Amino acid sequence: MSPQTLSTLTILILFLPLASFVLLLALGKRLPRQGDTIATGILFITLALSIVVMIGTLTRAPEPAIPGFPSAPIQSTFTWIDMDATIPVLGQQVPLKIELGIMIDNLVAIMLVVVSLISALVHLFSIGYMHGDKKYSRYFAYLGIFTFSMLGIVVTNTILMMYIFWELVGLSSYLLIGFWYEKPGPAYASKKAFLVNRVGDLGMWIGIMMLFTTYGTFRFDEIFASIAAGNYPFGSSTWLTIAGMCIFCGAIGKSAQFPLHTWLPDAMEGPTPVSALIHAATMVAAGVYLVARVFPMLTGDALLFIAIIGAVTSFIAGTIAIAQNDIKKVLAYSTVSQLGYMVLALGVGAYGAGFFHLVTHAMFKACLFLGSGSVIHAMHHSLHHLHDHDTDPQDLRNMGGLRKKMPWTFATFLIATLAISGVPLFSGFLSKDEILAGAWAFGSLRGGIGLMMPYIGFGVAMMTAFYMFRLVFLMFYGDPKRPDIDAHIHESPATMRIPLIVLSVLSFWFVFSFNPFGAASGWAVKSLPTPVTVTGTHWYPFAHGDGHEAAGPASSATSHETADGGAHETAPAPPTGETITQANPAQEALAHGIHAAHLSAMITSLIVASLGILIAWGVYRRKVIDVDAFTARVRPLHVFLSKKWYFDEIYEQWVVVPFVLFTTRAMAWFDTYVIDGAVNGVASVTRFQSWLSGLFDTYIVDGLVNFSGYFVGFFGIVMRKSQTGRIQTYVVFVVLGVIMLFYVFY
Amino acid sequence: MTVGLTHFLLVAAILFSLGILALATRKNAVMMLMGVELILNSANINLVAFSRYQAMNLDGHLFAIFVIILAAAEAAVALAIVLQIFKQNQTVNADQINKLKE
């Protein structure tokens, strides 16, 4: 397909969901069925176009590499604002203008399909799930604007446009989380999600501005090319590291990484399909996508920071997920944990693995969320039937034995659980395996703190298998804990079953790779070659062989190019100039290490996953140990975990309360002295002026009016004396008048 | 002493003054009408006198006859009005008929 066709289709893909939003917002309830079929239809068209674009992009002949891109992407840019001025950039004046545009490379193409697929299926699922809601039409409108914003993040080629859509995603997520805003929980959760995201976005904005002031452009390819040419912000690679960390702050917020992860579990207050769309597959993946997008410009130090954040996040969230009883909370912490996994993978330099996990995770986690939505829907209806409005339909402790009543939901949920637990023949195994191999290779190459990555990786893999199977056993196996509820449980309608089936099929291995034990030969990983870093020697100082001798090429001289003589066999000795697009030796070393670690990582991950599943089976199915007694024995730990490491309490105590206190005081002062002062001042001036004009009115205007009145009245009184009404008087006057006229004229 | 124009004019002036006096002082409406008759007749005397002593034609006589006819008509109308006034007010006293005042 020609680049023009691909660009046109991409623009169409971007704006179709916006059209759905505008249509539903404007016409809404006047449309047939309140417009749900229209919105869903538009999204399926978007999905079809996205698949066309993906196939067209992946089958294109590779273009020559440019800095930061393994193959030059298709770009289409226009100038949004031309300031008609110049700014000094790197010692010369360049025009100050802001460009927007779209870009299509393999990353974008795959992401387009992921977003539009999940969005289309969520639309379909919502027809059943949201049936009968008061704001049914507006719900679909919000889904439209969300999909538009998310696609906007994906297709852009300037970081500013990405930031704009980033905020739009924040807005639409706010609208969707707070969809039932009349209840206090969703209203609070939407506010929290928005504000916590703002914290991260501030850092991202600072990073963007650092890049813009240095390079005078927002375009990724130009920034990468300039870095590749050896230009660093403020002339120092440390500042490049800081800029990368700042941009990563945006990802910390959106992808719910430690320490800003607290909003995501609360966001479960929104409708469950929304959780599947936003909080499993797309919005939270935006942060990972951002890191993947700026991956070439991240230095080794920035990547280490990212990896540590990812590892810490996945560990904390994994431990919390074990102790939750709300099924959506378990899935939410599982999502946070898996996002930490992806971030960890990108941080250790396993670019393809991290992004591949994003794709597979989007499928099976959306399936899990929609499956839980199906269960909640059934529970809710049953409780409604019983006129029970106090029991929580999301509480695990009220479920059990659902597999007989909801076979479709059970089967799809089980497949997705197997996928997320890393069982072979499922997609999660492939991507998790890649990540663990990356972490393993990183640990052995980096040593020191790098060793934490594989340990945490395997630990989290075991925890994931454990808590996911705990969920399955408690929900679907055993005897119903509340037989009265169980009696009224029914399988969900077809509109809800179809998305589940589609997503569970997409959780199998053959979708991504025909070899069930290695993703490397599959299309997904093959089409995502790691872009060569443009930071040169500022990347991780890895070399082939023993990682502990990490004598990087940092010592070797002025050039940031591949100068560590002969340490690798693939890249030829660098000639002069644009060798930056050639392989970086450290990345080569890492790729080599990943390849070597692959088998051992796979075996270890199999062992830990089966261990996790086995423990869950033993504890919750065979009841080898009594859960309640065990919980009571480790009570402090259990409370600590079920209270989510007290993050919310700590933030409440140390951030929210002092901040609120300070701001209320400051605002009160401002209100009393500035606002009130201004109001009172204006009031005094007005009063003085009205007093003056009152005087003018009383004495001058009224004086004139009264004077003319009195004047006329006075003469009236005088003149009326002559009007006696006696005819004889008039006769006398006539005579006198005639005599007078006589005298006057003669 | 020959009777000249001046004597006629003097008589007419006296008559006119008496007419005005009657008009201005008598309270009875009928009396006031009689004053008007005196004024008209003083004018007649003037007309005839000027006709006799100045123009030497019959124009003055003609006018005098007109005036007499008009006076008759006027007397008829005015008396009718006076009758109506009496009907309304049970009086023909001009002092008491001051409704024009307001």
Image: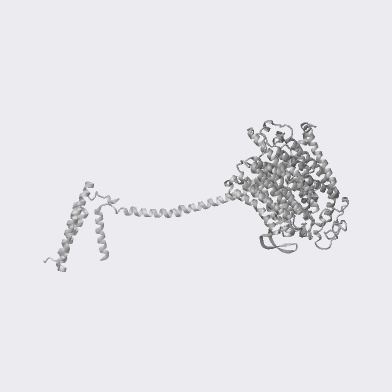
Q: How is the image coloured?
A: one colour
A546 left or right, relative to A174: right
Q: Is residue B17 left or right of residue A114?
A: left
Residue A255 in view, yes or no: yes
From what the image shows, is residue A614 above or below residue A3? Answer: above
- Looking at this rendering, what residue extends furthest in the bottom direction? B55
Q: Is residue A579 above or below residue A369?
A: below
Q: How many marks?
A: 0
Question: Toward the viewer: A56 or A11?
Answer: A56
Q: Quadrant of the C terminus of chain A?
A: bottom left
User: x%, y% of residue A476?
Assistant: 73, 36
Residue A109 vertical position relative to residue A189 in the rendered view, above or below = below
Task: Pinpoint residue A701: horizontal percent, then vertical percent.
Answer: 45, 54
Q: Position of residue A423 (x, y in %)?
A: 79, 42
Displayed quadrant of residue A662:
top right
Work out which quarter of the rendered image holds the N terminus of chain A and state it.
bottom right
Q: Is residue B6 visible?
A: no
Task: Pinpoint residue A536: horizontal percent, then vertical percent.
Answer: 81, 57
Corner quadrant of residue A379: top right
Nearest the viewer among B9 and A18 is: A18
Report the front residue among A237 and B60. A237
